[in-house]
Image (cartoon, rainbow, N blue to C red):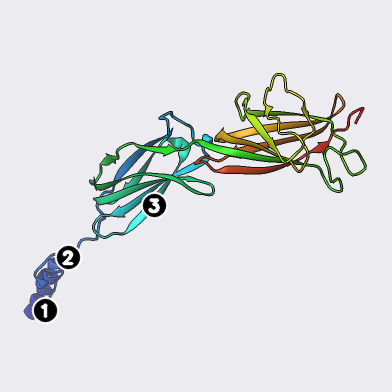
Amino acid sequence: MLFRVVILASLIGLASCGGCGSGGSPDAPNVDAAAGSVTLAWSLSDLGGQAIQCDQVGATTVALQIQNHVTKTGTTAMFPCTSSSGTQALAPATYDMSFELHAADGTLTTAADQKLVMVASGKDTPLMPVTFLINAKGSLVLRLAVPSPLTSICKSPPMGAGVTGMTITLVHTGGGCAPETFQRSGGATTIPYVVNCSSPAIATCIENTETLTVPILSSGPYTIHVRGKIGAVDCWQGDAPLQVPPQGKSLNETLTLTKIAASGC
């Protein structure tokens, strides 16, 4: 009986000791260190130092490229351009940061890198504010057309639309008139067309072989309105949104006119 009591006491002692026989306490579960974060604020400016809005240059997102300075591993945080700032959670470490401004068709521009950014546990690290510099100018090349089987805007029916005169207005989307000057080429006349939204000038018929060009135009969204007249009556129309690109790029657009059901047409 005594022998059984001694053995039982020994087993109880071993159970209460747990891992003591190995010389250490049991392993605690792994706990990730508390994350820190970085916050980026940005703005856009044209080459003259004037503040511009995202939609003026078709900017959609800001990409924050993050690389661990030691391991060289990285990730990318994406923020809407219009939000003007964004915060990204990161594990405590030292990072190198780079910055890109994106449009729907790719990268518009970049900003200077910021290296050796230290992120501490449980704290937010504000990055230096970033300004994206952009050439907020582009150009517009416009051609007019009529639906098949018509082959001409200006010639008489049956193969032409019979247009005798035209007006053009160009407006900033959500804003006022854009009093730009279209250069005409490829036709019988080279007289420029000056946009006047309140009192549009009537130009001679602009044929589908002609090109209308605004060589330097502020980038951004526009709406164009073209009216083709037969005598004094608006008989053909063309209305379209235009997104003029920045960085000196050109928008090439063909606007097809449609017939207006009106007396005299």
Element at label 2: loop
Tell me the residue that label 3 is attached to: 76
Place of residue 162 in the rendered image (x, y in percent of width and height, measured from the top left): 88, 36
Rounded to the nearest angstrom, the CA distance separating label 2 from label 3 is 39 Å
31 vs 74, left or right, is left
Which amino acid type corresponds to the residue marked 3 in the rendered image?
Thr
When the figure is inspected, residue 12 is found, relative to residue 110, above or below; the finding is below
- Marked residue nearer the N-terminal end (1 or 2): 1
Element at label 1: helix
21 vs 170, left or right, is left
247 vs 190, left or right, is left
Element at label 3: strand
Say the numbered circle drawn on residue 4.
1
- Marked residue nearer the N-terminal end (2 or 3): 2
Which amino acid type corresponds to the residue marked 2 in the rendered image?
Pro
Tell me the residue that label 2 is attached to: 26
Rounded to the nearest angstrom, the CA distance separating label 3 from label 1 is 67 Å
Q: Nearer the viewer, residue 44 or 41?
A: 44
Q: Nearer the viewer, residue 23 or 256?
A: 256
Place of residue 252 in the rendered image (x, y in percent of width and height, measured from the top left): 64, 44
Q: Residue at x 68, y 40 (%)?
A: 142
Q: Residue at x 40, y 38 (%)?
A: 132
Which amino acid type corresponds to the residue marked 1 in the rendered image?
Arg
